[in-house]
């Protein structure tokens, strides 16, 4: 038993002592075997126990690490959605009749899906309306939250509150708050807004 203990000297003392006790149990239960064969069998059983414990510990660490990585990846995706929603919603509520072509092009850059098709189909009309009414509109994000996120499908939903300022024909600027729901989709690694509607 002393030789067996010496062979396990590299292990932590508490774990080593438990293995030595376990070897004693194995040895007692296998007392009917020839001593040489019994010692080899005991050594093999203890070795299997060590391998099982080490494997269990490794898988436990790997599982915790994977769970932590998944959580981190989801948090990063959520942050990316919020950044895209803030930029996209502010952009969609911004236009200056003096540079309407640039602003409408920015709308198209931050949108996808049906919203993008609708805006692209009426691009000239949007520019002309802004010039005719001498519209100046701008917005700031007050707050926003991701209400749904499917990273695998590349879809997300956001609720946001915007502070908007609207001025037409050089008149008095009107400032108000707008609560909106927005849907986003991931296209070529970028999150873009695919739908916006007023929130209740």
Image (cartoon, grey):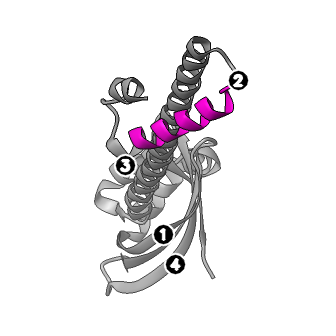
Helix, strand or loop for disc 2: loop
Helix, strand or loop for disc 4: strand
The answer to whether residue 167 shows anywhere in this view is: no
The picture places residue 169, in percent across and down from the top left corner, at 35, 76
Which of pointers 1 and 3 lies earlier in the amino acid sequence? 3
Q: Residue at x 40, y 38 (%)?
A: 16
Helix, strand or loop for disc 1: strand
Mark closer to the observer (1, 2)? 2
Q: Which residue is mark 4?
A: 179
Alpha carbon of mark 1 to alpha carbon of mark 2: how far? Answer: 71 Å
User: Which residues fall within the magenta stretch?
Assistant: 16-31
The answer to whether residue 141 shows anywhere in this view is: yes
Which of pointers 2 and 3 lies earlier in the amino acid sequence? 2
Q: Which mark is residue 145?
A: 1
Q: Is residue 25 magenta?
A: yes
The picture places residue 7, in percent across and down from the top left corner, at 36, 23
Crowd tier of the residue under label 1, counting other residues whose Cα lies within 10 Å: few below 14, some 14–19, many 20 or above: some
Alpha carbon of mark 3 to alpha carbon of mark 4: how far? Answer: 27 Å
Alpha carbon of mark 2 to alpha carbon of mark 4: how far? Answer: 82 Å
Q: Residue at x 48, y 33 (%)?
A: 54
Number of numbered callouts drawn: 4
Q: Residue at x 49, y 56 (%)?
A: 126
Alpha carbon of mark 2 to alpha carbon of mark 3: how far? Answer: 94 Å
Q: Are marks 2 and 4 in contact (CB under 8 Å)?
A: no
Mark closer to the observer (2, 3)? 2
Q: Is residue 59 above or below residue 134?
A: above
Alpha carbon of mark 1 to alpha carbon of mark 3: how far? Answer: 31 Å
Q: Is 34 displayed left or right of 192 in the figure?
A: right
């Amino acid at each position: 038993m002393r030789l067996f203990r010496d062979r396990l000297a590299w292990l932590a003392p508490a774990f080593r002592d438990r293995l030595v006790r376990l070897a004693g149990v194995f040895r007692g239960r296998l007392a009917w075997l020839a001593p040489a064969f019994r010692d080899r069998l005991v050594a093999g059983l203890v070795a299997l126990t060590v391998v099982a414990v080490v494997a269990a510990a490794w898988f436990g660490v790997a599982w915790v690490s994977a769970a932590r990585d998944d959580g981190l990846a989801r948090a990063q995706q959520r942050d990316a959605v919020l950044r895209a929603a803030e930029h996209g919603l502010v952009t969609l509520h911004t236009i200056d009749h003096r540079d309407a072509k640039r602003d409408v092009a920015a709308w198209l850059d931050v949108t996808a899906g049906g919203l993008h098709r609708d805006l692209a189909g009426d691009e000239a009309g949007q520019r002309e309306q802004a010039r005719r009414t001498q519209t100046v509109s701008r917005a700031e994000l007050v707050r926003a939250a991701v209400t749904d996120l499917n990273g695998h499908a590349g879809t997300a939903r956001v609720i946001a509150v915007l502070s908007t300022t609207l001025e037409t024909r050089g008149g008095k600027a009107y400032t108000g708050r707008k609560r909106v729901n927005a849907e986003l989709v991931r296209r070529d690694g970028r999150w873009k807004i695919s739908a916006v509607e007023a929130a209740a």
